[in-house]
Amino acid sequence: MSILDLVNVRWHEGFQAIKKPRSAVLDGAFRGIPELAAGECGSCDACTAVCAARAIAPRPLAIDLGRCTLCGDCARACPAGRIRFSNEHRMGASARESLVVREGDVVRDYSGRIVPARREVRRILGRSLRVRSVSAGGCNGCELELNATGNVNFDIGRYGIEIVASPRHADALLLTGPVTAAMAGALDDVWRMMPEPKLFIAAGACAISGGVFDGSPALDRSFFDGRVPDLCLPGCPVHPLTFVEGILGLLGR
């Protein structure tokens, strides 16, 4: 391929960078926050029967985004059509209980569930954040999406957010994966080596709840004993824009 061919390809690709990631709208192919219509389920448990993540409570209808893999099987199985998925990617929340979507919830109000970090923490960190990512037994899906936040499309570095190699340089621990027994000790070591003040971000259904692996004897989630995430980012995997919106919300920006 000649230089002219490369220039021609680049010309037809157009402008790839998302100019304003925080106001970006994803197309309908993306499954985001579910919308649950009010109504009666009767004795039907079709949605719970197909949910491998055990994320659905049928009566009253509710979906736990901390467990949901956003597969869409429940929407296809519901004979009453009470479940549909919006394209809203702003799914992050500070409190674990805020990840539960109930019938009648308004999707557009969901973006306000991120509570900024303590004022003193934000004063020390300023407008930047150094993040140490730890994959504790993940499938590499969330890790790939996290890597994508640094590409030309999303460019999280424009906000002063950087993924660092050493925990001694990090302000926040970003955990992906369900935390296998083999990774439990390493995860503790990373947290111990990070200087105070530090933030804890759980990204993806596996990190938040164990996901479809919850209850497996291969897991050791003792890291969560006495440690509550400052930010939970749902998804399977987490979309890059969910990362951007969530972390900026945590920084109060």
Image (spheres, grey):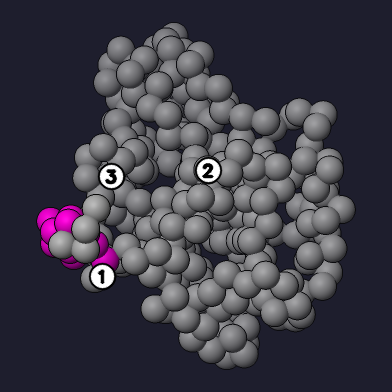
Q: Of label 2 and label 1, which has the lower sequence position?
A: 1
Occupied quadrant, residue 149: bottom left
Residue 54 placement (x, y as % from top left):
57, 26
Residue drawn at 83 percent across, 56 percent down: 186
Q: Of label 3 and label 2, which has the lower sequence position?
A: 3
| Residue 140 placement, left or right of 7 | right
Residue beneath disc 2: 141
Q: Amino acid at mark 3?
A: Asn
Report if residue 13 lies within the magenta region: yes
Distance, label 3 to label 1, CA atoms, is: 17 Å
Residue 234 placement (x, y as % from top left):
50, 47
Q: Does residue 167 show up?
A: yes
Q: Does residue 66 show up?
A: no
- Residue lying at the far front of the rendered structure: 2
Instruction: Establish if 232 lies above or below 7.
Output: above
Q: Amino acid at mark 1?
A: Lys
Residue beneath disc 1: 20
Question: Which of the labelled discs sits on residue 87, or is there none?
Answer: 3
How crowded pointer 1 is (Cα within 10 Å; few <14, some 14-19, many 20+) is rated as: few
Instruction: Establish if 74 lies above or below 163.
Output: above
Pointer 2 with pointer 1, Cβ within 8 A: no
- Residue lying at the far top of the rendered structure: 43
What number of labels is visible? Answer: 3
Which element carries disc 1, helix, strand or loop? loop
Which residues lie in the magenta part?
5-17
